[in-house]
Amino acid sequence: MTAEAGLPDTLRDLPIWTPDAVELADLELLLGGVYQPLNGFLGSFDTAMVIAGGRLADGTPWPVPVTLAVPKELTSHERIVLQDPEGVPLAVLTVAEAWQDPTSQGWRLAGPLEALRSPAHGPFHRLRRRPDEIEPAQGPVLAVATREPLHRKQLGQLRQVAERLSAGVLVLVLLNGEHDEALVRALLAVRKELPEGARIVPVPLPARDDHERDVLLRSHVAAAYGATHLLAEEEAEGTAVPLVVPEPWAYDADVEVWRPVARIEPDHVQAELTPERLGELLDRGEPVPDWFTPPAVAAELAVARPPKFERGVTVFLTGLSGSGKSTIARGLADALVERGGRTVTLLDGDVVRRLLSAGLTFSRSDRDLNIRRIGYVAAEVTRHGGVAICAPIAPYAATRAEVRRMVAAAGDFVLVHVATPLEECERRDRKGLYAKARAGLIPEFTGISDPYEEPDDADLVLDTSRMEPDEAVARVLELMVAGGWVRPE
């Protein structure tokens, strides 16, 4: 595929590629000068040195690999255009090296980047700033780089440290792709409780799996934005700016304020609200106490994590043809509609094939595409607070996992394995499909000439050869009631 509209004539014959979400975030930070001193994606030697010792090949400290994965057919080109998912060209990569990742065997491209335009940011784009768009501070700058709201404890600690350092405050909102808007709103809601002149800047920086390297990367980003110190929960070595660990704070139940633990009588220290306890309150729709967080933050937490009986959820039934998935799915949809209170969307395999996936074959690639389409629609239903009930065969574990990830970014996901034995499914065979598959008339038929990969992560396993349809539906309903997605009758 070659680049077309919106490009100079000299670039229109170049191949184009859309990086994944993490790579697009890295691309924005590379183009914006946030990933100093990098000017492009890393090659094989630099990547190996970073992984082994946290340094580039020339000895410059750098904590994480910043690489670009591409299909093999792009490795023969000298230049490629990188675009966002909407087809907007963002940059041109001049290929300095095409290399194969020894861990995944996937292909990577390395080389410097030429910016074509700034990414389109969507909500809160007015807050997104490059480091060169931030007016330099006249004194010390204390940065806090966070993927969580600032509650009363963190706000108190931040004010205390900033006062001690006589520093201005920079809040770097680390966007991670999930509930980003609610996080920005929660931090804007406490702007009046931050030191005067504090700045809030969203930065697209998805979390890394390695916590220590993630902290190091945060310090590099903070340094690029002019910070002289970074607030942190614990010490770490090799950071780009010094870390400042605040003294412990707690809630003094006697005078009803947060303050340093050293100033509180031991029997007056109130236990902090743990993340688990906070999650339980939100799941049940109970109020978050004012002593823990400002009401405006609590309101944004409830938006990002609504109570389970209002939260979107996908019930994904998988199993062989004839296992009873469709019967259970229709019965579950009817039962939920009868109870009321939830919007229900049924995505049954046969119906989807006639409409959403019309024209697809039964090849493995087309079957995977069919499941991805179902997953996309289910995720959108879930995102808007509905209940999506899906009943495809979905024989492959990797594709089911992909759907789980799509839905989990929007709400909750429940996997039901309808584990009716093949012999029973074949005995039912109302459509004659198994007979045709045995006769070789249907190639790649699940359970006969193509495998069914049984899930090992199912929330519920049902065998309809041992129960009536009503009982199977009741079992799924019980699971949804126990999980909090459906209110008890």
Image (cartoon, rainbow, N blue to C red):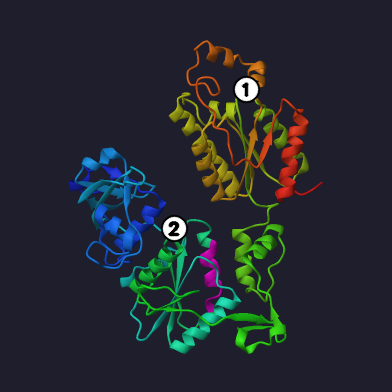
Q: Which residue is mark 1?
A: 422
In percent of width and height, residue 220 lies at: 35, 70
Task: Identify which residue is drawn at 24% across, 61% down.
Answer: 57
Q: Is residue 248 visible?
A: yes
In x, y percent, where is residue 121? 41, 59
Residues in magenta, as a range = 182-192
Residue 449 versus residue 92: which sits nearer the camera?
Answer: 449
Image coordinates for residue 279, horizontal then vertical, percent: 65, 61
In magenta stretch: residue 403? no
Residue with the most extreme right position: 489
Which residue bears the numbered disc 2? 122
Vertical relation: 345 (above or below) 226: above
Q: Amino acid at mark 1?
A: Leu
Given the current orientation, which residue lies at the most extreme top position? 439
Q: Is residue 96 left or right of residue 459?
A: left
Quadrant of the snapshot with the N terminus:
top left
